[in-house]
Image (cartoon, helix red, strand yellow):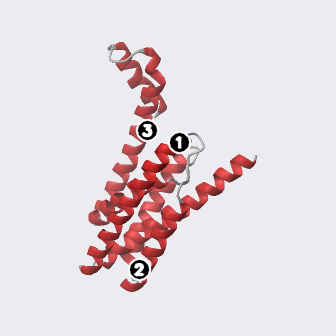
Amino acid sequence: MDRIAKGLTDYVIRKGMIEETERNIYEYGFTLTMEVGLFVLVSLFLTLYLHMFVEGVLFFVIFAPLRSYAGGLHLEKYHSCFVLSCLTFSGILLTSRYIRIPTYFSLIAFFLLEMSVYAFYPVENTNREVDKEEDTYFRKKLKLFLIFDMFIVLVCATLKKDRYILVIVATFLMVAVTMILGKYKNKKMSDS
Protein backbone atom coordinates (compact mmCIF):
# COMPACT_ATOMS: atom_id res chain seq x y z
CA MET A 1 0.00 0.00 0.00
CA ASP A 2 2.92 2.30 0.67
CA ARG A 3 4.09 1.91 -2.95
CA ILE A 4 0.61 2.72 -4.27
CA ALA A 5 0.39 5.75 -1.98
CA LYS A 6 3.82 6.90 -3.17
CA GLY A 7 2.74 6.42 -6.81
CA LEU A 8 -0.47 8.39 -6.28
CA THR A 9 1.45 11.16 -4.55
CA ASP A 10 4.00 11.27 -7.37
CA TYR A 11 1.13 11.56 -9.83
CA VAL A 12 -0.59 14.51 -8.09
CA ILE A 13 2.78 16.27 -7.72
CA ARG A 14 3.53 15.78 -11.47
CA LYS A 15 0.09 17.15 -12.31
CA GLY A 16 0.85 20.23 -10.20
CA MET A 17 -2.05 19.60 -7.83
CA ILE A 18 0.20 19.70 -4.75
CA GLU A 19 3.72 20.80 -3.90
CA GLU A 20 6.63 18.46 -3.12
CA THR A 21 6.64 19.85 0.43
CA GLU A 22 3.21 18.25 0.98
CA ARG A 23 4.42 14.76 -0.05
CA ASN A 24 4.42 13.19 3.45
CA ILE A 25 0.91 14.42 4.23
CA TYR A 26 -0.51 13.04 0.98
CA GLU A 27 1.33 9.72 1.19
CA TYR A 28 -0.05 9.27 4.71
CA GLY A 29 -3.54 10.28 3.58
CA PHE A 30 -3.55 7.91 0.61
CA THR A 31 -2.21 5.05 2.75
CA LEU A 32 -4.78 5.62 5.48
CA THR A 33 -7.62 5.87 2.95
CA MET A 34 -6.62 2.59 1.31
CA GLU A 35 -6.22 0.81 4.66
CA VAL A 36 -9.60 1.95 5.96
CA GLY A 37 -11.19 1.30 2.58
CA LEU A 38 -9.88 -2.28 2.52
CA PHE A 39 -11.29 -2.94 6.00
CA VAL A 40 -14.67 -1.47 5.02
CA LEU A 41 -14.77 -3.61 1.86
CA VAL A 42 -13.90 -6.79 3.76
CA SER A 43 -16.49 -5.88 6.41
CA LEU A 44 -19.12 -5.26 3.76
CA PHE A 45 -18.34 -8.63 2.19
CA LEU A 46 -18.66 -10.32 5.60
CA THR A 47 -22.00 -8.69 6.34
CA LEU A 48 -23.38 -9.71 2.96
CA TYR A 49 -21.96 -13.24 3.22
CA LEU A 50 -23.46 -13.69 6.70
CA HIS A 51 -26.72 -11.92 5.73
CA MET A 52 -26.14 -9.50 8.61
CA PHE A 53 -25.97 -6.15 6.84
CA VAL A 54 -28.01 -4.27 9.47
CA GLU A 55 -25.82 -5.66 12.26
CA GLY A 56 -22.69 -4.64 10.35
CA VAL A 57 -23.96 -1.09 9.84
CA LEU A 58 -24.98 -0.94 13.50
CA PHE A 59 -21.46 -1.98 14.52
CA PHE A 60 -19.93 0.91 12.55
CA VAL A 61 -22.52 3.42 13.80
CA ILE A 62 -21.55 2.51 17.37
CA PHE A 63 -17.85 1.77 16.91
CA ALA A 64 -16.61 4.67 14.78
CA PRO A 65 -17.64 7.54 17.09
CA LEU A 66 -16.60 5.65 20.24
CA ARG A 67 -13.18 4.85 18.86
CA SER A 68 -12.75 8.37 17.49
CA TYR A 69 -13.60 10.18 20.70
CA ALA A 70 -12.72 7.71 23.46
CA GLY A 71 -9.48 6.34 22.02
CA GLY A 72 -8.06 2.88 22.53
CA LEU A 73 -5.27 0.55 21.56
CA HIS A 74 -3.20 1.47 18.49
CA LEU A 75 -1.16 -1.31 16.93
CA GLU A 76 2.16 -0.50 15.28
CA LYS A 77 1.64 -2.36 12.00
CA TYR A 78 -1.31 -2.12 9.65
CA HIS A 79 -1.37 -5.87 8.99
CA SER A 80 -1.80 -6.62 12.70
CA CYS A 81 -4.52 -4.02 13.03
CA PHE A 82 -6.31 -5.27 9.91
CA VAL A 83 -6.31 -8.92 10.99
CA LEU A 84 -7.39 -8.09 14.55
CA SER A 85 -10.12 -5.73 13.29
CA CYS A 86 -11.50 -8.34 10.87
CA LEU A 87 -11.47 -11.05 13.56
CA THR A 88 -13.15 -8.73 16.03
CA PHE A 89 -15.79 -7.60 13.55
CA SER A 90 -16.64 -11.14 12.46
CA GLY A 91 -16.57 -12.30 16.09
CA ILE A 92 -19.11 -9.65 17.08
CA LEU A 93 -21.39 -10.57 14.18
CA LEU A 94 -21.17 -14.29 14.91
CA THR A 95 -21.68 -13.73 18.64
CA SER A 96 -24.89 -11.84 17.96
CA ARG A 97 -26.03 -14.56 15.56
CA TYR A 98 -25.45 -17.61 17.74
CA ILE A 99 -25.66 -16.43 21.34
CA ARG A 100 -28.90 -15.53 23.04
CA ILE A 101 -28.83 -13.44 26.20
CA PRO A 102 -31.91 -12.23 28.09
CA THR A 103 -32.74 -8.62 27.24
CA TYR A 104 -32.50 -7.45 30.84
CA PHE A 105 -28.95 -8.87 31.12
CA SER A 106 -27.92 -7.18 27.86
CA LEU A 107 -29.34 -3.88 29.09
CA ILE A 108 -27.48 -4.12 32.40
CA ALA A 109 -24.26 -5.03 30.57
CA PHE A 110 -24.75 -2.13 28.17
CA PHE A 111 -25.20 0.46 30.92
CA LEU A 112 -22.18 -0.87 32.85
CA LEU A 113 -20.04 -0.84 29.71
CA GLU A 114 -21.23 2.63 28.78
CA MET A 115 -20.18 3.92 32.20
CA SER A 116 -16.86 2.08 31.85
CA VAL A 117 -16.09 3.68 28.49
CA TYR A 118 -16.78 7.11 29.96
CA ALA A 119 -14.68 6.32 33.04
CA PHE A 120 -11.71 5.01 30.98
CA TYR A 121 -11.66 8.15 28.81
CA PRO A 122 -9.19 9.42 27.60
CA VAL A 123 -6.88 6.93 25.94
CA GLU A 124 -4.51 9.00 23.86
CA ASN A 125 -2.27 7.87 21.06
CA THR A 126 1.35 8.26 22.18
CA ASN A 127 2.11 9.83 18.78
CA ARG A 128 -0.40 12.65 19.32
CA GLU A 129 -1.10 14.35 22.60
CA VAL A 130 -4.48 15.98 23.13
CA ASP A 131 -4.51 19.51 24.53
CA LYS A 132 -7.06 20.79 27.05
CA GLU A 133 -9.32 22.35 24.41
CA GLU A 134 -9.40 19.15 22.34
CA ASP A 135 -10.01 17.11 25.49
CA THR A 136 -13.05 19.24 26.34
CA TYR A 137 -14.35 18.87 22.78
CA PHE A 138 -13.77 15.09 22.69
CA ARG A 139 -15.41 14.58 26.10
CA LYS A 140 -18.47 16.56 24.99
CA LYS A 141 -18.76 14.56 21.76
CA LEU A 142 -18.29 11.29 23.65
CA LYS A 143 -21.15 12.20 26.01
CA LEU A 144 -23.41 12.96 23.03
CA PHE A 145 -22.61 9.66 21.36
CA LEU A 146 -23.14 7.74 24.60
CA ILE A 147 -26.59 9.33 24.91
CA PHE A 148 -27.29 8.52 21.25
CA ASP A 149 -26.17 4.91 21.80
CA MET A 150 -28.45 4.65 24.85
CA PHE A 151 -31.34 5.86 22.69
CA ILE A 152 -30.56 3.21 20.04
CA VAL A 153 -30.44 0.48 22.69
CA LEU A 154 -33.76 1.58 24.20
CA VAL A 155 -35.38 1.61 20.75
CA CYS A 156 -33.99 -1.87 20.05
CA ALA A 157 -35.30 -3.10 23.41
CA THR A 158 -38.72 -1.63 22.69
CA LEU A 159 -38.78 -3.34 19.30
CA LYS A 160 -37.45 -6.58 20.85
CA LYS A 161 -34.35 -6.59 18.62
CA ASP A 162 -32.15 -8.57 21.00
CA ARG A 163 -29.62 -9.40 18.29
CA TYR A 164 -29.03 -5.69 17.65
CA ILE A 165 -28.62 -5.02 21.36
CA LEU A 166 -26.06 -7.81 21.56
CA VAL A 167 -24.09 -6.25 18.65
CA ILE A 168 -24.02 -2.98 20.58
CA VAL A 169 -23.03 -4.65 23.86
CA ALA A 170 -20.27 -6.66 22.18
CA THR A 171 -19.01 -3.52 20.42
CA PHE A 172 -18.93 -1.61 23.71
CA LEU A 173 -17.13 -4.53 25.36
CA MET A 174 -14.53 -4.53 22.59
CA VAL A 175 -14.04 -0.75 22.88
CA ALA A 176 -13.71 -0.97 26.67
CA VAL A 177 -11.13 -3.76 26.38
CA THR A 178 -9.12 -1.83 23.77
CA MET A 179 -9.23 1.25 26.00
CA ILE A 180 -7.79 -0.75 28.90
CA LEU A 181 -5.14 -2.28 26.64
CA GLY A 182 -4.34 1.15 25.20
CA LYS A 183 -3.87 2.62 28.68
CA TYR A 184 -1.66 -0.33 29.63
CA LYS A 185 0.44 0.03 26.46
CA ASN A 186 0.82 3.80 26.96
CA LYS A 187 1.87 3.32 30.59
CA LYS A 188 4.35 0.61 29.64
CA MET A 189 5.85 2.85 26.92
CA SER A 190 6.10 5.84 29.26
CA ASP A 191 7.78 3.72 31.95
CA SER A 192 10.53 2.55 29.57
Is 59 left or right of 109, judged from the image as shown? left
Q: Nearer the viewer, mark 3 or mark 1?
A: 1
Which is more N-terminal, label 3 or label 2?
Answer: 3
Q: Do the residues labelled 1 and 2 touch (CB within 8 Å)?
A: no
Which is more N-terminal, label 1 or label 3?
Answer: 3
User: Please, which residue is most extreme toward the left here?
Assistant: 159
Q: Which of marks 2 and 3 is in front?
A: 2
Q: Do the residues labelled 3 and 1 touch (CB within 8 Å)?
A: no
Residue for point 36% across, 84% down: 103
Q: Which amino acid type corresponds to the residue marked 1 in the rendered image?
A: Asp
Q: What element carries label 1?
A: loop
Residue for point 40% across, 15% down: 19
Residue designated by label 2:
106
Residue 115 showing in the rendered view: yes
Q: Is 10 placed above or below 71 here?
A: above
Percent x, y of residue 66: 42, 57
Residue designated by label 3:
32
Q: Which amino acid type corresponds to the residue marked 3 in the rendered image?
A: Leu
Q: Residues within 10 Å of mark 3 (few under 14, many from 20)?
A: some
Percent x, y of residue 42: 37, 52
Residue designated by label 1:
131
Residue for point 52% across, 45% down: 132
Q: Is mark 3 on a helix, strand or loop?
A: helix
Q: Which amino acid type corresponds to the residue marked 2 in the rendered image?
A: Ser
Q: Are marks 2 and 3 in contact (CB under 8 Å)?
A: no
Q: What element carries label 2?
A: helix
